[in-house]
Image (spheres, grey):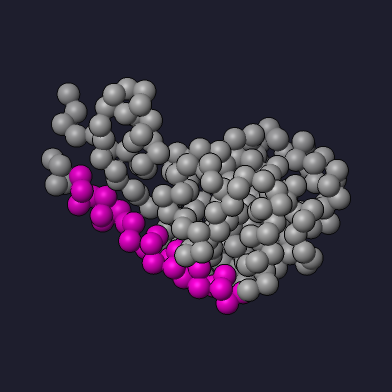
Amino acid sequence: ECRRLFTIAKNTASRLKRFNGLNSELLYHPPRLADRLQSGLQGNYVLSVGRLEPVKRVDLLIRAMAFVDKPTKLLIVGEGSQRDPLETLAAKFDVLDRVEFLGRVQDEHLIRLYADSLAVAYTPYDEDYGYVTLEAFLSHKPVITATDCGGTLEFVKDGVNGKICDPAEEAIAVAINTLAGKREHAASLGAAGYEIARQITWDGVIEKLVESS
C-alpha cells in the first residue's frame, strides 16, 4: 500500500533490494543532538561512542592503542555486554593508563567530549547509517573509520574529512598518530566534515516527505 519507500542510508537501501527485491529512495536525517553539537578544543584524545557489543568493534580501537604514540588517549563512551572483556583486553595490551571507559554519559557531557576531541574513531562492521559519524562532523571533528564499516563510508572520504583504514589495529594507529602529529590538518578535515553534515536537516526531510505525499 506504500506509494514510496525511503531508507536512512544507501547501505540499508541495498539490503532492502537484495533481500526483499524492493527499491527505495535515500533520505538521510540528522542525529538527535544535531542542533546542540559544537566545535571546541583539540584535546589529546580520540573519542569512541557506541554500544559495547562485538559488531561495534571497540576492541579494534583498544588494540590499536598499543601502537599509538603517547600522550594520545582513547575515551570510550557507552555500555554493553563487552564492557568487562574490553577492560581485560586493555589490560592485556598494557594500555589501561591511556584507555578510559566512561560508560553512559549525559548529553551535555557527550557534547563536550565531542567538542574537545582530536578525532572520533568509529569502526563498526557494516553499520546501517551511523549517527556517530554525523555527530563528529557537526562537532568539526574528523572521523577515523574502516573499509568495511558500511554506512560510515557514505560520508567519510579519506584525506578529505577523515581517515579510512584497513580494519586492522596498526592501520588505525597510523591514522591516529597522523592526526595527532598534524593538528592543523586534523582541524581542516573536521571542517570539511561539518560542511557535509550541516546540509542534513529535518527541514530537508520534511520537504522530501511533503513532495511525496
101 relative to 193 in the view: left or right: right
Up the image or down, 210 lies above or below 12; here it is below
Q: Nearer the viewer, residue 10 or 170?
A: 170
113 relative to 82 in the view: left or right: left
Quarter of the image with the N terminus in it = top left
Up the image or down, 94 lies above or below 125; here it is below
Provide the major secondary structure of the magenta segment. helix
Residue at position x 80%, y 46% from top?
A: 90
Q: Is residue 134 magenta?
A: no
x, y (%) of residue 195?
Answer: 39, 67
Up the image or down, 56 lies above or below 97; here it is above
Could one spot residue 106 in this view of the protein? no
In the figure, residue 87 lies in which quadrant? Answer: top right
Quarter of the image with the C terminus in it = top left
x, y (%) of residue 142?
Answer: 53, 63
Residue at position x 27%, y 27% from top?
A: 22
Q: Is residue 206 magenta?
A: yes
x, y (%) of residue 28?
Answer: 34, 48
Residue at position x 68%, y 59% from top?
A: 174
Q: Nearer the viewer, residue 167 or 83?
A: 167
Residue at position x 58%, y 77% from top?
A: 184
In the figure, residue 109 lies in which quadrant? Answer: bottom right
Q: Nearer the viewer, residue 60 or 6?
A: 60
In the rendered structure, which segment of residues is drawn in magenta?
183-209
Up the image or down, 35 lies above or below 56; here it is below
x, y (%) of residue 59?
Answer: 70, 42
- Farthest residue to the bottom: give it: 184
Could one spot residue 193 in this view of the protein? yes
